[in-house]
């Protein structure tokens, strides 16, 4: 007699993000991170970024048509969303580069109707080479329309200063900024000091309204690595999709990124890329 097979399904997670052609950052980094952490990854693309090696590696940015973004979100939520009846329910989403006020409106509508439990926001505020006036509109729209929907936010040093309105020079001011961003958003906050704060360690601050925890790991060099921010937020997303608490997700993500930076990939670009297989 054969016993009935028990079907098990992986957790699923969606990233709404841009493509970064060289594979270091963006949706590619997110999908690789999801896969490494045992989560079925889905990517809905908002834009295509191609660095320009003939112009100081500035970003060439092409938005995806708004209807095409809406179509991707429609297909994804119909297949795996709350009303789909799928056994692997999509309740966790990561937001990466959106890049324009129009895309922010399209994505915020989908977040409102999507019924997601976990909305992880990597608040990508500037894209190198974007026109400054446009970038300011995009930043303001992100703060007004996406930040209030986030349940977890992962600002880097620059983004944490921008979101909190505070200057960040050391761990104490990074803590103050994380608390301020939590007060503004209601989200759990993982504010990254990275190579921007002096000292031997790469220090991040986690704050969720109750727990304040400093996450620290020895710095691997003094130069930022491409894909570290995307992979950190994606690792948080994957862990939340699997049912971790926000604090557990933050700790696992920090360890994942530290191992990925230690095992980074050198390229002809002026920045190395994080290797998501680093922890293996
Ligand atoms: O690392 C931020 C980032 C996110 N998303 C895309 C990017 C970048 C940086 O290059 O290109 C698509």
Image (spheres, rainbow, N blue to C red):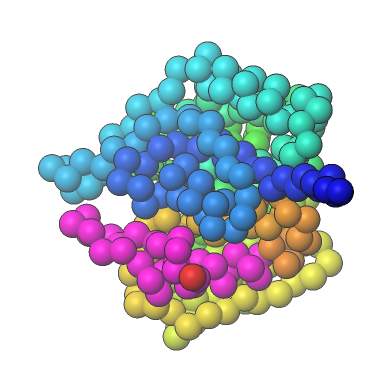
Relative horizontal placement of residue 260, taking residue 13 as reference (left or right): left
At a point 71% along the width and 31% down the height, the residue shown is 80
Residue 182 visible in the snapshot? no
Q: Residue furthest left?
A: 54
Q: Is residue 83 left or right of residue 279?
A: right
Whole-percent x, y for residue 217 in the image: 53, 80
Quadrant in the picture for residue 81? top right
Task: Please state which of residues 263 and 20 is positioned toward the viewer in this rendering.
Answer: 263
Measured as percent of width and height from the top left, residue 194 is found at: 47, 69
- The residue located at (42%, 55%) in the rendering is 227
Quadrant location, ligand no. 1 = top left
| Residue 271 within the magenta-colored segment of the rendering | yes
Q: Residue furthest bottom?
A: 200
* Viewer can see residue 38: yes
Q: Nearer the viewer, residue 36 or 29?
A: 36
Image x and y of residue 90, in percent: 72, 37
**Part of the protein shown in magenta:** 250-279
| Residue 23 located left or right of residue 37 | left
The percent position of residue 33, horizontal first and vertical second, equals 52, 54
Q: Nearer the viewer, residue 71 or 41?
A: 41
Q: Residue furthest top?
A: 67
Q: Residue at x 81, y 28 (%)?
A: 85
């Amino acid at each position: 007699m054969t016993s009935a097979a028990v079907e098990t399904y992986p957790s699923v997670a969606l990233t709404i993000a841009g493509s970064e052609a060289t594979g270091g950052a963006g949706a590619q980094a997110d999908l690789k991170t999801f896969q490494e952490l045992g989560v079925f990854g889905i990517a809905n693309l908002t834009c295509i970024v191609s660095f320009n090696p003939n112009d100081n590696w500035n970003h060439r940015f092409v938005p995806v048509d708004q209807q095409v973004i809406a179509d991707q979100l429609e297909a994804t939520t119909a297949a795996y969303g709350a009303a789909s009846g799928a056994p692997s329910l999509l309740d966790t989403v990561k937001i990466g580069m959106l890049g324009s006020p129009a895309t922010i409106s399209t994505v915020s509508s989908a977040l409102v109707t999507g019924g997601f439990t976990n909305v992880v926001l990597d608040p990508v505020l500037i894209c190198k080479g974007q026109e400054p006036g446009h970038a300011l509109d995009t930043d303001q729209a992100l703060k007004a329309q996406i930040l209030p929907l986030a349940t977890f936010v992962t600002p880097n040093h620059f983004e944490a200063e921008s979101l909190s309105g505070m200057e960040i020079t050391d761990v104490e001011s990074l803590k103050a900024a994380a608390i301020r961003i939590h007060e503004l958003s209601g989200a759990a906050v993982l504010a990254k000091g990275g190579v921007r704060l002096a000292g031997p360690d790469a220090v991040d601050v986690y704050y969720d309204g109750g727990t304040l925890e400093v996450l620290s790991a020895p710095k691997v060099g003094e130069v930022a690595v491409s894909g570290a921010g995307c992979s950190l937020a994606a690792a948080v997303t994957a862990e939340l999709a699997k049912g971790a608490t926000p604090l557990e997700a933050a700790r696992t993500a920090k360890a994942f990124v530290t191992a990925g930076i230690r095992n980074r990939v050198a390229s002809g670009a002026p920045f190395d890329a994080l290797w998501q297989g680093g922890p293996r």
